[in-house]
Image (tube, helix red, strand yellow):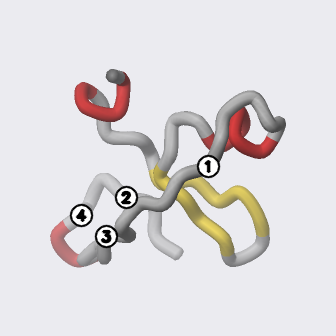
Amino acid sequence: TRCDDERPALREIGVGHRVACHWVEDIAAGRLTRHEVTPVAVDFESSADLPRP
């Protein structure tokens, strides 16, 4: 799947709400069903490719 092959970009989808998900728009539109995932903490110091908050 795309999730296995590609790391999604961390994007802001609302004020103070960021998500790294390829499918956030499809989930919000009801085209895909949500499911639980385990959040992963990000160390911004070692992740230079991620946008800063």
Q: Amino acid at mark 2?
A: Leu
Residue toward you, 34 or 50: 34
Residue neighbourhood size for the residue with mark 1, other residues' Cα within 10 Å, grouped as few (<14), some (14–19), many (≥20): few
The secondary structure type at the circle numbered 3 is loop
User: Residue 1 appears in which quarter of the rendering?
Assistant: top left
Mark 4 residue type: Ser
Mark pair 1, 2: CA separation: 24 Å
Q: Whole-percent x and y of residue 32?
A: 67, 33
Q: What amino acid type is highlighted by mark number 1?
A: Arg
Give the residue type at disc 3: Val
Report crowding for label 3: few under 14, some 14 to 19, many 20 or more residues within 10 A (C-alpha): few
| Residue 31 position by quadrant | top right
Callout 4: SS: loop
To which residue does mark 1 refer? 34
Rendered location of residue 43, percent (x, y): 24, 77
What residue is shown with label 2? 50
On screen, 10 above or below 1?
A: below
Task: Give the residue drawn at x 31%, y 76%.
Answer: 41
Instruction: Check whether the beta carbons of the residues at disc 4 and disc 2 lie within 8 A of each other.
Output: yes
